[in-house]
Amino acid sequence: MRAPALYTAAGSLLLATLTAAPAGGAPAAPGAAELHGTAVAAARAGAVGVRFGTCPAVEDLPDGIQCGTVSVPLDYARPDGRQIKLTVSRVRATQKDPHNSKRRVPRQGALVFNPGGPGASGMYFPLVGALPAWKGLAAAYDLVGYAPRGVGRSAPLSCTDPKQYLKAPTQAPAHPSPSYKKERVAQAKAYARGCADRAGAALPYYTSLNNARDLDVLRAALGEQRLTFMGASYGTYFGALYAALFPSHVRRMVFDAAVNPAPEQVWYRNNLDQSAAFEERWTDFREWVARHDDVYGLGATAEDVLRSYDKAAAQLAAEPAGGKVGPGQLQGAFLSAGYYDDLWPHRAQALSAYLKGDPKPLIQQAGPHQEAAKEAENSNAVYTAVECNDAPWPTDWKVWDRDNTRLARVAPFETWDNVWMNLPCAYWPAARQEPLDVRTGPGELPATLILAAERDAAAPYEGALELHRRLSGSVLVTERDAGTHGIAGGPNPCVNGYLHAYLLDGRLPVRRAACAPHPEPEPKGGSRKAAGTPAR
């Protein structure tokens, strides 16, 4: 089947005038058919709205959250063709001032959130309204989450048997052998074939551009003339696409942990940069553990902590913990610590306990959970389809091998794991798009807010700088010397002050602002303390 129309920088400049393509005849410019299809779908959704009601049990959401669906075209070039339904969740604005119970807060509409991925669901987002840092926003906005196309019950995508997806234990060599590489290449080819076999003709339509178009249909279905949106991680990328495609539909937008939108970065080079950044964050974690050697006993220097980690990996390779935690599961658990520093005490405690003879904490934290296999496989399938469809990838294994062998010499922690996750894109059976050159000129887009942690590994800081350069009038707020992936509504009151001022009052600094880092996590749960040695 024909792939979706390609977008170019020239195409984006035409969007201001192409509010709708003619009802008959060929499109006037590349992308005009999809633009017209989005307008048709948005008008249809605006007329129907979202019929919110009790959430299905399968969503596992508490009472008080409402659920509904929004229909969108599978292919925006054919808006009257096959439709798919996106699931949506909502909690109404409380309109109660959290600081003054007698004051009623004006409702400002819906705040739509996407947590990233690709492949993550935002259905749980309305729950954040109960957290102290979010109560002010929950007073003014309906909190709206949704599952993007392919995710959860939104036309779910699958590429392999979920029971096989979480197969464990696995290896994770930092410098894999030729035979291991050959095995993983074969697995990547099989996975790409599985995506094609299971998705069929729908496979090319899981893209970031379609995610942006879906967002405009959701805006209309919610009855919003202009969109207030917060995207985290990957959500910043298709949020940026939305800003470029539909600038006049934007009210306020927050880009939290911004992905580099430069076309040449999407997605192969972004993943190389991510692997390099994770090495620095891995060092941050090990230095923190070393500073608390009195608690964990894993070493007094970052190099000592690495030796402790490598010792555990070697032991797990010889004898997996609980029969299911091998080096691959260990690496996955500690990779997540590179995203969120609040995990640091838990991971350090588990490693410490394992090396002292107690594998239970490590099994609990790193072991695969089969009850989550279906959700995990679905998320990975969507991630793969969107990234593979979005942009050209090297199709010669020698290119991947050359680039990542070189990178692994200086950044061994995540490099090859990142390769294996993305390698199906080398053998992808669907046509690839050319990424949109995201740019807005002065006055084309309302002021937007970009939030970034300076040492974020999953979304390296250069991505925030690049997005800031490309979105005219944007403001960048940086959390200095910190690396948590996603900082909106987190533990830093300075960051939250800028967030609330923007979303509640439309106020922003002139161009840039900086916040001191939030405090490092406190050590706890170390095996020395458990053995009777006091922590200091």
Image: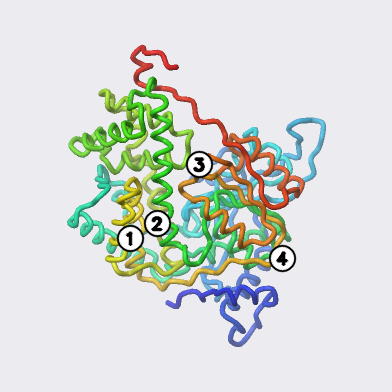
Whole-angstrom CA distance, mark 4 to mark 3, is 31 Å
Q: Earlier in the sequence, mark 1 or mark 2?
A: 2
Whole-angstrom CA distance, mark 1 to mark 4, is 38 Å
Q: Quadrant of the C terminus?
A: top left
Q: Are marks 1 and 3 in contact (CB under 8 Å)?
A: no
Please identify the quarter of the rendering in which residue 425 is found. Answer: bottom left
Q: Quadrant of the N terminus?
A: bottom left
Mark 1 secondary-structure assignment: helix
Which residue type does callout 3 highlight? Answer: Gly
Whole-angstrom CA distance, mark 2 to mark 4, is 32 Å
Which residue type does callout 4 highlight? Answer: Pro
Q: Earlier in the sequence, mark 4 or mark 3?
A: 4
Which residue type does callout 2 highlight? Answer: Leu
Q: Earlier in the sequence, mark 1 or mark 4?
A: 1
Whole-angstrom CA distance, mark 1 to mark 3, is 25 Å
Whole-angstrom CA distance, mark 3 to mark 2, is 18 Å
Residue at x 49%, y 25% (from the top left corner): 522
Task: Please tell me which residue lies in front, 214 or 51.
Answer: 214
> Circle 3 sits on which residue?
483
- Using the image, tell me which numbered label, if any, was put on residue 403: 1
Q: Are marks 1 and 2 in contact (CB under 8 Å)?
A: yes
Mark 3 secondary-structure assignment: loop
Q: Earlier in the sequence, mark 1 or mark 3?
A: 1
> Circle 2 sits on which residue?
272
Whole-angstrom CA distance, mark 1 to mark 2, is 8 Å
**Horizontal side, residue 536 vs residue 428: left or right:** right
Mark 4 secondary-structure assignment: loop
Please identify the quarter of the rendering in which residue 248 is found. Answer: bottom right
> Circle 4 sits on which residue?
442
Figure check: 119 above or below 37:
above
